[in-house]
Amino acid sequence: MATRRSFFQKTAGLAGALSLTPFLSRAKSEDISEALVELNRFSPEEAADEDDLWERMAQAYTVSPNILNLNNGGVSPQPKVVQDAVDRYYHLSNEAPTYYMWQILDKGREPLRRKLAALAGVSPEEIAINRNTTESLGTFTWGIDLQRGDEIVMTRQDYPNMIHAWKQREMREGVKINWINLSLPVDNDDTVLKAYISATTPKTKIWHITHLMTWTGQILPAAKLCAEARKRGIISIVDAAHSFAHVDYKISDLNCDYFGTSLHKWLCAPFGTGMMYIRKEHIEKTWPIFPIDKPTSADIKKFEALGTRSFAPEQAIGQAIDFHNAIGARRKQERLHYLKSYWCNAISKNPRVKLHISLKPEYSCALGTFSVDGMDVGDISSKLMADYQIHTVSIKWENVNAVRVTPHVYTTTRDLDRFIEAVGKIAAS
């Protein structure tokens, strides 16, 4: 508590680092800081519905006052303090690129690695910093040695980039994908476990597990799946694009072999920042995608050989971690689930509206999906934007046909009331 208060008091004093724009007063910065300090006086459960404090805290973001963004699941906005850090590092780089980038900012990767490892609950020697989940999972797909006929178990609800990667390896090398087709929502762990086990044969080498599904927000029992895979001598790969810094957990809680996430989603880090985890024992035998002189090294840094890239977004991840920690992982999760439940409970009272997500906190958090009887989901999403300036996304993938709604911590219940009213009018029409 004292640490968080000190952090925000210090931040408020640094020339209004949390201010929205240059002309806003220092008082605004102090109000944001005090709101976050006050939130930390409450337990995570108590803080979830403290709308006034969350609304004040939301001023740390620079989101549009005209468009209501309810598609934070794709890419989340960054708080102003993170945007300012990117600008600062970028301008510094331009003063003398080869000096400031390679001799100054590049030295910041190791402290950042330790900071990410602490957030993830694993060793810094198992964490690599990259650009997104696709890069992480692609590294695993192509970097793990497999033989013709070896099998991978995955669901048809997994993310397309990951599906395409495994399909390419299937086409080129003769590995085989055993498909699971989940009927969502599912709020029974045994149903999911049995689906993976039923698709497994003596030739199965890998279970590909999406922790939180992009289409509906369905949370799968990743820890139980990883434990079952380990018991069977099967490698577990976790796609955590949507769950990291969203659901309150550590990578170590999952006990997986491989893990990838995008930090520009729920951590609100700069666009194009990500992280991979590889269990120490697997690093040496996993090939990097980009060429390096020692590809069989046991050093996790071999996966960061990307050539020239911008160090500014990478280094600003540190400010995003500070902001996330200042709110508190559990407090953030409780607020996000509260917001999802708030709009879901309201619109589900309409007999024409159907929810496509469980409201149980162990099976969903911020993401939720709905449809309206007799309407195409694309038309619903388009109408929300055209008539009400509310940005959502329509989902049509396998057996999912719904509108996805994704608030974030800067979203207020007043915002959601606007959305609820719009859905009511659309359903009535």
Image (cartoon, rainbow, N blue to C red):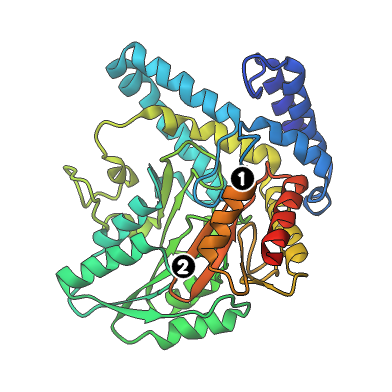
Q: Is residue 136 above or below residue 24?
A: below
Dividing the image into 4 quarters, which one contains the N terminus?
A: top right
In the picture, measured across the screen, residue 160 lies left or right of residue 23, that is left
What kind of element bears circle 1? loop
Q: Position of residue 32 (x, y in %)?
A: 74, 29
Q: Are circles 1 and 2 on residues that touch, CB within 8 Å?
A: no
What kind of element bears circle 2? strand
Q: Residue at x 61, y 31 (%)?
A: 62
Q: Quadrant of residue 260?
A: bottom left
Q: Residues within 10 Å of mark 1 (few under 14, many from 20)?
A: some
Q: Is residue 216 visible in this depiction of the protein? A: no
Q: Residue at x 41, y 16 (%)?
A: 91
Q: Position of residue 212 (x, y in %)?
A: 53, 63
Q: Quadrant of residue 253?
A: bottom right
Query: Which one is in front, 278 or 41?
Result: 41
Q: Is residue 314 above or below residue 131?
A: above
Q: Is residue 186 above or below residue 53?
A: below
Q: Which residue is mark 1?
A: 389
Q: Position of residue 37 (x, y in %)?
A: 78, 33
Q: Quadrant of residue 259?
A: bottom left
Q: Amino acid at mark 1?
A: Gln
Query: Which one is in front, 287 or 27?
Result: 27
Image depth: mark 1 or mark 2 in front: 1
Q: Residue at x 56, y 35 (%)?
A: 78
Q: Amino acid at mark 2?
A: Lys
Across the whole image, how many numbered discs are drawn on residues? Answer: 2
Label disc, if present, on residue 396 of the rendered structure: 2
Label disc, if present, on residue 64 of the rendered structure: none
